Image: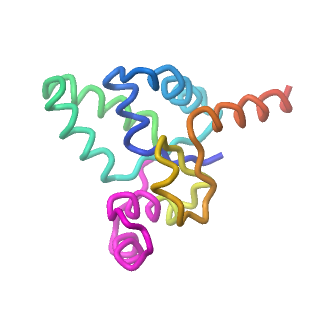
Amino acid sequence: MKVLFDTNIILDVLLNREPFVVNSSLLMAHVEKKDIDGYLCATTVTTLDYLLSKALNKRESRAGIQKLLSLFRISDVNSTVLNLSVNSDFSDFEDAVQYFSGVCSEVNALLTHNIKDYKNSELPVYTPDELLQIIRLNLATKE
C-alpha cells in the first residue's frame, strides 16, 4: 500500500507532539519495516525543514530530514501538480498540492489528522488510528 503522509503526521514524531506521537511513530515504523510504502510531498520536506529549524536547530533539523529521505519516497511537485491544485475545489492550496502530488505518484491513500481538509479527495483518507487498524488486518491475513 502506497500512502502519502501529511506534514502533520511527521511533525508529531519529530516534535514529540502528544497525544499523536505514539500512533504516528508506529506508522513510520511500518514504513521502515516496508509494511507500507511511505510518501512525502516535496513541499512537506521544505516545510518540515523550516519548522524544525525554528523548534530545534539547523543541525538537528537536517538530521531529521536526512532520516526522512532515507525512509520515504518523495512525490514530485511540478507544473501538472500545481495546475491541478490551483484548478481544484480544495479550499487550501497547500492541501491541494499535497493531494495532487500523491495522485500523480499513484498513492493508494492519504494519512492525516485533518480528514475534513480532504473532503474533495477521490483517494481514501485515513487517520492514524484507521490506518493502523488496516495494517494490522493486512498483516494478520498474511500470517
Q: Judge whether 132 appears above or below 88 on screen.
A: above
Please give left or right for residue 129 compared with residue 10 in the image. right
Magenta range: 73-101
- Magenta stretch: includes residue 77: yes
Residue under the image location 84 percent in, 31 percent down: 142
Residue under the image location 57 percent in, 40 percent down: 127
- Magenta stretch: includes residue 133: no
Please give left or right for residue 138 compared with residue 48 in the image. right
Q: Judge whether 83 appears above or below 136 on screen.
A: below
Tell me the quarter of the picture where residue 89 sits: bottom left
Q: Judge whether 26 appears above or below 131 on screen.
A: above
Tell me the quarter of the picture where residue 21 sits: top left
Return the x and y of residue 58 as percentages of the image width and height. 13, 28
Return the x and y of residue 140 as percentages of the image width and height. 82, 27
Return the x and y of residue 18 as percentages of the image width and height. 40, 20
Return the x and y of residue 106 as percentages of the image width and height. 57, 61
Please give left or right for residue 131 compared with residue 17 in the image. right
Residue under the image location 79 percent in, 32 percent down: 137
Residue under the image location 44 percent in, 61 percent down: 101
Q: Quadrant of the C terminus?
A: top right
